[in-house]
């Protein structure tokens, strides 16, 4: 046995086979990730080049096109369309003719190449030591995230050059050898984007003082060169506009994600706003740069560079959307002592940087200040408050492990199909759960609209045709009770009011309540139930997409009364404030009934008392009565809702295995005093 376990033939053979299998899986994953990165790159090129010529690369066309500002005889800043530094104009002017010829494939592929190089540099800059797996997978993951990010997508679509300063700084910090060469690249980046000068304190206080001297000399030299070549433009930019302040679009535009833009959007202006911006900006710069220096000394230079970039985003007078890549790079920091908390920060950053802000937060006036400044808030958090772990922390490489359920033997060898997902007992991060629920619901709304061409009335003919098909099937099965139930309930006022209220009020309240109770009291069961609900909703979205269906209340000639919204004009239906947001032809399957059935099943399975189980099962019964009585669904829609819920629970079991059940702790029995055979304790 010793030979087998510690170097014998059998042990070596087993170890070699396992290692080879692991290498094969890693190789397959790596190939798959590179394929994803290639597909995303091709998609970006396709989106740009398939856009009509007058609508793509509009910023580049504005600068270097036949009528662009770089062709003008006077000042570059006579028009507010050019916002770059005089040195940027000096560099671009000789390239005008070449850029005009490259306004399609050449410019797009050139920008795409810069993104790929940026991803490769980031992958190499990860704090050491990194595992072999991380080293192999980091590059395609980084490139894919960059391709998905809004800053890169905007830069490619608009024809912006904002990727170049970021790449120059990263090359100066991680790629070139020698401090002077490093400073040279950062000086060029600052000559193109002056806020890159904020990297000078980071270099100085981490011992790279020659790099600071080199960057300062380069920046001053290039500025002097531009001043000598274009004195009027340089005076306009550096003196009259204080490093570009006031150039370009309105500073209070939503695309300006700087502190200055946020203060203007909040209604502040004049000396008060300027004073507040300077004070807050100085505080953010001092705190952020101090944190960056600390993490750089800790060996996390990439995180330090990202934090410094986030400081630049916050304190710059204008930080347009295509200049916000620094926020995405901040996801390399590790946050949280528990393994289950580790995904929170990177997932939040990825969502903020890849999805429109309106998908992150509800369309409520009270939340507009958060929604309008979500990227700024992410940059501010990364620069000042997010508690990134130090490499000296005991939790940096060994976080508190997640409590998994023991594997449960099953009759089928392939169940679960994805055992690596695990069945977890610990409670997931609440902020991440709320964020994912919100994003998931936004995607749900978008797919519902897209299924009918992006409007609530789109696809009406198809939806009504499918309604005729459903009615024919129900008549064949003798379950076409919608008209009879609707009119019977409509005649009884209190019953009509009850079902209207139930239909409008309990669709979201009950599922969210069930999820909240499970999250607080039964975290392991919360994960199981949440996964089943998510799978059911995804399957339902496929049904909405493939089979748009008019509900009974929107079927001409059927005579069903819309008890909730009143009599409808079928050509221009009115559902109140939700008219422009919802797809009323997403009836099959009924998620009203599906979600209520999910609630009933979860309560029936997990509730400790029989009356609780019975009360839980009443909810789907009342819901199916309400959706039919109000004319919002066919009976077969409820059957479809039940089918997707069953599929959701089935997929959860198939992929993750049975519902995890925590082991009961054994009762400790004291053996100091013997227990008599009668079972009575001695007196």
Image (cartoon, helix red, strand yellow):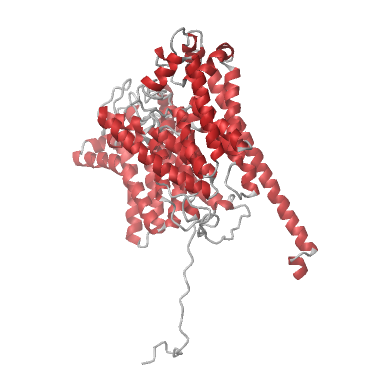
**In this view of the protein, which residue sits in the foreground, 10 or 384?**
384
| Left or right: residue 524 compared with residue 369 | right
Q: Is residue 165 visible?
A: no
**In this view of the protein, which residue sits in the foreground, 411 or 275?**
275
The answer to which image quadrant residue 79 occupies is: top left
Looking at the rendered structure, the number of numbered marks drawn on it comes to 0
Question: x%, y% of residue 25?
Answer: 67, 46
Residue, x 49% and y 50% (percent of image)?
342
Above-or-below relation of 166 to 429: above
| Left or right: residue 141 compared with residue 198 | right
**In this view of the protein, which residue sits in the foreground, 610 or 377?**
377
The answer to which image quadrant residue 176 occupies is: top right
Q: Residue furthest bottom?
A: 683
Residue, x 36% and y 41% (percent of image)?
283
Task: Pick the quarter of the image with the N terminus.
Answer: bottom right
Q: Residue furthest right?
A: 9
Above-or-below relation of 64 to 211: above
Question: x%, y% of residue 370?
Answer: 34, 37
**In this view of the protein, which residue sits in the foreground, 345 or 466?**
345
Question: x%, y% of residue 188?
Answer: 54, 27
| Left or right: residue 532 compared with residue 99 | left
Q: Is residue 450 visible?
A: yes
Question: x%, y% of residue 318?
Answer: 39, 28
Task: Pick the quarter of the image with the C terminus.
Answer: bottom left
């Amino acid at each position: 046995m010793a030979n087998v376990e510690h170097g014998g033939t059998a042990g070596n053979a087993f170890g070699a086979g396992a290692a080879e299998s692991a290498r094969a899986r890693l190789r397959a994953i790596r190939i798959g990730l590179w394929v994803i990165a290639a597909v995303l790159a091709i998609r970006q090129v396709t989106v740009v080049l398939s856009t009509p010529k007058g609508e793509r690369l509009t910023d580049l066309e504005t600068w270097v096109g036949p009528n662009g500002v770089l062709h003008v005889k006077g000042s570059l800043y006579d028009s507010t369309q050019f916002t770059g530094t005089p040195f940027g104009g000096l560099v671009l002017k000789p390239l005008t003719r070449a850029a005009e010829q490259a306004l399609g494939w050449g410019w797009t592929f050139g920008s795409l190449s810069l993104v790929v190089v940026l991803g490769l540099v980031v992958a190499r800059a990860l704090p050491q030591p990194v595992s072999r797996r991380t080293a192999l997978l980091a590059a395609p993951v980084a490139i894919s995230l960059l391709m998905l990010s809004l800053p890169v997508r905007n830069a490619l679509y608009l024809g912006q050059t904002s990727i170049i300063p970021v790449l120059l700084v990263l090359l100066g910090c991680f790629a070139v050898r020698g401090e002077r060469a490093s400073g040279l690249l950062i000086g060029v980046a600052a000559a193109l984007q002056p806020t890159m000068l904020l990297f000078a304190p980071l270099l100085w206080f981490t011992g790279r003082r020659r790099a600071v001297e080199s960057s300062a000399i380069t920046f001053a030299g290039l500025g002097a060169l531009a001043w000598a070549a274009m004195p009027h433009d340089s005076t306009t930019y550096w003196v009259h506009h204080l490093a570009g302040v006031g150039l370009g679009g309105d500073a209070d535009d939503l695309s300006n994600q700087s502190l200055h833009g946020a203060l203007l959007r909040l209604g502040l202006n004049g000396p008060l706003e300027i004073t507040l911006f300077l004070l807050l900006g100085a505080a953010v710069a001092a705190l952020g740069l101090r944190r960056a220096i600390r993490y750089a000394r800790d060996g996390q230079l990439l995180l330090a560079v990202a934090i410094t970039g986030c400081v630049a985003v916050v304190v710059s007078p204008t930080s347009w959307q295509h200049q916000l890549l620094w926020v995405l790079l901040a996801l390399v920091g590790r946050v949280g002592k528990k393994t289950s908390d580790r995904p929170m920060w990177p997932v939040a950053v990825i969502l903020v940087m890849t999805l429109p802000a309106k998908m992150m937060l509800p369309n409520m006036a009270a939340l507009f200040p958060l929604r309008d400044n979500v990227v700024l808030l992410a940059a501010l958090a990364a620069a000042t408050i997010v508690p990134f772990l130090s490499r000296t922390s005991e939790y940096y490489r060994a976080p508190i492990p997640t409590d998994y359920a023991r594997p449960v033997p099953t009759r089928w060898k392939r169940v679960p199909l994805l055992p690596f997902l695990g069945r977890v007992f610990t409670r997931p991060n609440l902020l991440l759960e709320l964020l994912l629920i919100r994003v998931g619901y936004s995607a749900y709304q978008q797919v519902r609209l897209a299924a009918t061409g992006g409007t609530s009335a789109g696809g009406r003919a198809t939806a009504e045709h499918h309604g005729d098909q459903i009615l024919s099937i129900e008549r064949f099965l003798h379950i076409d009770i919608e008209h009879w139930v609707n009119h019977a309930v409509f005649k009884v006022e209190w019953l009509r009011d009850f079902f209207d209220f139930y239909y409008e009020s309990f669709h979201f309240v009950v599922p969210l309540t069930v999820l909240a109770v499970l999250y607080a009291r039964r975290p392991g069961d919360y994960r199981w139930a949440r996964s089943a609900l998510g799978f059911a909703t995804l399957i339902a979205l496929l049904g909405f997409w493939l089979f748009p269906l008019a509900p009974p209340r929107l079927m001409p000639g059927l005579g069903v009364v819309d008890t909730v919204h009143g009599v409808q004009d079928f050509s221009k239906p009115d559902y109140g404030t939700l008219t422009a947001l919802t797809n009323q032809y997403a009836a099959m399957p009924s998620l009203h009934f599906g979600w209520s059935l999910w609630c009933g099943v979860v309560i029936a399975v997990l509730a400790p008392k029989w009356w609780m189980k019975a009360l839980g099962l009443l909810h789907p019964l009342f819901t199916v009565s309400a959706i039919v009585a109000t004319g919002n669904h066919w009976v077969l829609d409820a059957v479809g809702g039940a089918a997707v819920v069953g599929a959701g629970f089935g997929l959860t079991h198939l992929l993750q295995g049975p519902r995890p059940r925590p082991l009961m702790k054994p009762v400790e029995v004291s053996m100091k005093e013997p227990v008599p055979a009668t079972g009575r304790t001695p007196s």
